[in-house]
Image: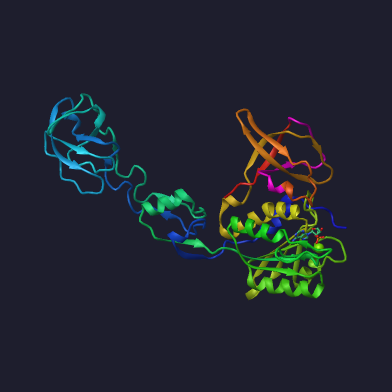
Amino acid sequence: MAELQSVERALAALLDGVAALPAEPLCVERAAGRVLAEPVVARLDVPPADNSAMDGYALRATDAGRTLPISQRIVAGRATEPLAPGTCARIFTGGEIPDGADCVVMQEVVNVAGDSAMLPADIPAGDNVRRRGRDVSVGQPLLAAGTRLEAAALGLLAGQGITRVAVRRRPRVALLSTGDELIEPGEPLAPGQIYNSNRPMLVRLLERFGAEVVMAVHVADDPATTREQLQAAAERADVVVSTGGVSVGEEDHVKQALEALGRLDLWRLAMRPGKPLALGRLAGKDTQMVRFVGLPGNPVSSFVGAWLYLRPLIGALLGCPRLNELPRLVARAAFSTRTQARRHYMRVSLEFTTHGIVARAFADQNSAVLTSCAAADALAVIPAHSVVNEGDAIECRWLVDD
Ligand code: AMP
Ligand code: MG
């Protein structure tokens, strides 16, 4: 039987030669969550002109300490007149600083009588002025290629008046749920059957990672059907994911089908859960090779496998480096455990305290217990052949919502 492969080796084999998908133009209004295919360079200064950071009075700093006539009223959104010498202007936050003025005094420290304002002394030039280009200046790199367009990035694009961007096409994923025992929610449960938990779980994870699930089918435990469905999936998708049927039982047909249609790169990993995970390639449309990830059927193995392998794979297809690796953090174990030949990815919840982070392990870490994933914030990575005592520092991979 093949030797167990390390998680790192498996990941390297999976990502080897994966190139980012082509770019497509998209209007910014629909681009939330998408990944930029090209860098964006600023074409406008933000703010476009000096403006006031306060409600108050704009003046020349050299006129401070005097009573000045109020010669104009400046509200945000209007063009201004130059400031007449020896006067000040009533101004509101965001109003443009008129030519000739160089500072703003907040209204709380100004005494107003009729049309004149008594201004305090010693106001430095530039006080309460937001300079043109302080946030963004023309020509500045604004967003790098590979940036996921989240709230602040969308705000920056809008600030530039940009309405279209080039984003990566979303990776198309075909999802195959193997197992004669599986039925879908909504159907009555007959003896021997179970509901398909993996499908909605993986659809959600894949969409969160940035993929589009273009096909989700149920595959019977039969060699011919498995081959047919795998072939159909490879023709429609950039990535084919299956669950179940990759173990050593007689009803496990996925590996043989993969070997018949493409290539098995790696099988059996030194991790728990998820040992019988299989990685390979299938011939897709136009002879392009489609990545294949065969997750074990146990829902916990599928869940962990998706975070460890599908997330970086989708990230590579999107050209989005932040998806390459789950963020690492160090926590104190609120449990004790020991491992044997396989690295253990334990499902833990995290408590962020003023003394650091505490990781609590779900009591039952069996790979058939999906409840352990529902409350998990992170995977605690327990190396092979090691002992962890309560209070030990352990490395965790954060199941970050990105
Ligand atoms: P397999 O990898 O096909 O041997 O499946 C391992 C275990 O996971 C079996 O107990 C299956 O019934 C169960 N299983 C497989 N696929 C699913 C699924 N989609 N949802 C829930 N359980 C599953
Ligand atoms: Mg099965």
Q: Give the range drawn in magenta.
A: 373-391
- Asked whether residue 6 appears in the rendered view, the answer is yes
Quadrant where the N terminus sits is: bottom right
Image: 75 above or below 22: above
Nearer to me, 148 or 400: 400
Is 388 contained in the magenta span?
Answer: yes
| Residue 160 picture location, percent across and down | 36, 53
- Give the total number of marks visible in the rendering: 0
Quadrant containing ligand 2 reads bottom right
Q: Can residue 386 be seen in this view?
A: no
Answer left or right for 355 relative to 373.
Answer: left
Residue at position x 49%, y 61% from top? 167
Q: Is residue 69 magenta?
A: no
Compared to 358, does 46 lie above or below?
below
Q: Could you tell whether 24 is left or right of 386 in the image?
A: left
Choose top left, top right, bottom left or bottom right for residue 128.
Answer: top left
Q: Tell which of 352 and 209 is nearer to you.
A: 352
Q: What residue is shown at x 22% (from left), y 24% (from top)?
A: 122
Image quadrant where residue 309 sits: bottom right
Left or right of residue 44: residue 85: left
x 78%, y 69%: residue: 259
Q: Where is residue 340 in the image (x, y as percent from the top left)?
A: 84, 43
Q: Which residue lies furthest to the front in this view?
A: 188
Residue 76: x %, y % from top left: 26, 45
Asked which colour scheme the image uses, the reply is rainbow
Q: Residue 22, position in %: x, y?
A: 53, 65
